[in-house]
Image (spheres, rainbow, N blue to C red):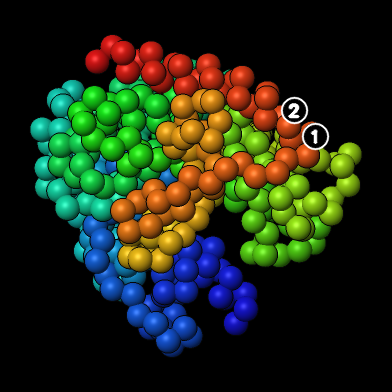
Amino acid sequence: MAAIRTLTRRVGGSMSGMSLLRPQHSAALFSTSAKAQFKVAVCGGAGGIGQPLALLMSMCDLVKEVSVQDVSMAMVPPAGVAADLGHIEYPAKVNGYAIDPSKPAVDQLAECLTGCDLVLIPAGVPRKPGMTRDDLFAINAGIAKGLAEACAQHCPNAIVGIIVNPVNSVVPLVAELYKKKGLDPLKIIGVTTLDIVRANKFVAEITGQSPLDIDIPVIGGHAGVTIMPVFSQSTVASGISVDRIPDLDKRVQDGGTEVVLAKAGKGSATLSMAYSGARFGKSVLAGLAGTPTTECAYVASSVTELPFFSSKVTFGKSGVEKIHDIGPLNAYEEGRLAEAKAALKVEIETGLNFAKTF
Ligand code: NAD
């Protein structure tokens, strides 16, 4: 029971029935019922991350509708993914939408996006061996911009979760686009949850504790040295001997590369990312439904001198409700913070410079 309760907290952010358990089971276990009330879109929904992410979001009992969006030449037609998911015994209605990427997304996505409360964007090209997240920017920035213009037009109040890499640069460019349109840049949120998920799992492997009882804040950004786990703020991880911390820190930073290499050029992290994207998405929806929920996320921020930074963020009824300070750091972490900020500054500028071109 305790483990199930913790799992529910992990994937749903609250005890209000938003678990991976079937609703009748969670209702029986927790004596609560969640209302299917939100519309969610997954852009790139026929891709490696998109399909399992759409699956997990369609299994959230707060969700009444899921739009699976992709391009017309996707490996699997989004209508097929939607038909498949539409047979699962959860309340959500699932629809597929294919666009012609040679034409503006904004002109093709009115039905897909209108009424959305949350849009998750793993649309784009994944990293191949030898490619850095920055190499991806030229391709993925254009895709993200097109989809963001469509969100700005058709669901301007939706929370937009940016999964497409490089998150450190794509979020500033999309937030800038929102600002230029007079919209709230805090609707644009970089999804860094996978870094927290990995940190929790790797600490669990070292300490023998359940990962469900571990919650490592990971601050900074979402690439290389900008990924900064704050082990000292976890009671479990603070027991790990200091000489093991640099390797553990590096393993969290390189988690993506570990998967890229293991998949030998045939993809990057998809299943762990889908899990993490769903954990993030369900935390946002829990907040919108009235249960404030906190996750680390990469947003426009004033907690450091940088205009964007990832730290704990509380989601509430209108989205981002509070951006938390970094909290206490030890000497090793102070050094890492300086390193993370120096790298992040350059990556933010890449996004902001791109935004100057439109
Ligand atoms: P994938 O190639 O399997 O899927 C991407 C999907 O996006 C494809 O189905 C493709 O057709 C679609 N797409 C391309 N252009 C589109 C457009 N204009 N509109 C809608 N869909 C479009 O790739 P993947 O493995 O799912 O990775 C997707 C992205 O997520 C990559 O950029 C990857 O680097 C990133 N990623 C992020 C994290 C993170 O932690 N934030 C982790 C892993 C991967």
Pick whichever, 185 or 115, lies toward us.
185
Along the horizontal axis of the image, is 191 left or right of 79? right
Residue drawn at x 20%, y 42% is: 156
Q: Is residue 174 above or below residue 209?
A: above
Q: Quadrant of the N terminus?
A: bottom right
Q: Is residue 137 above or below residue 114?
A: above
Q: Around disc 1, counting alpha carbons within 10 Å, would you say few (fewer than 14), some (14 to 19), or many (20 or more)?
A: few
Q: Which residue is mark 1?
A: 331
- Whether the residue carrying mark 2 lies under 8 Å from ligand 1 is answered with no
Q: Is residue 308 above or below residue 17?
A: above
Pick whichever, 42 or 168, lies toward us.
168
| Cα gap from disc 2 to disc 1, whole angstroms | 6 Å
Q: Residue 146 in the image: state x and y as whole percent.
A: 24, 28
Q: Which mark is residue 335?
A: 2
Tell whether label 1 touches label 2 (CB within 8 Å).
Answer: yes
| Amino acid type of the residue tagged 2 in the rendering | Gly
Residue drawn at x 20%, y 28% is: 181
Residue drawn at x 26%, y 61% is: 38
Q: Residue 345 in the image: state x and y as whole percent.
A: 54, 20
What is the number of callouts on the image?
A: 2
Q: Quadrant of the C terminus?
A: top left
Pick whichever, 130 or 279, lies toward us.
279
Label 1 residue SS: helix
Work out whether residue 343 can be spotted. Answer: yes
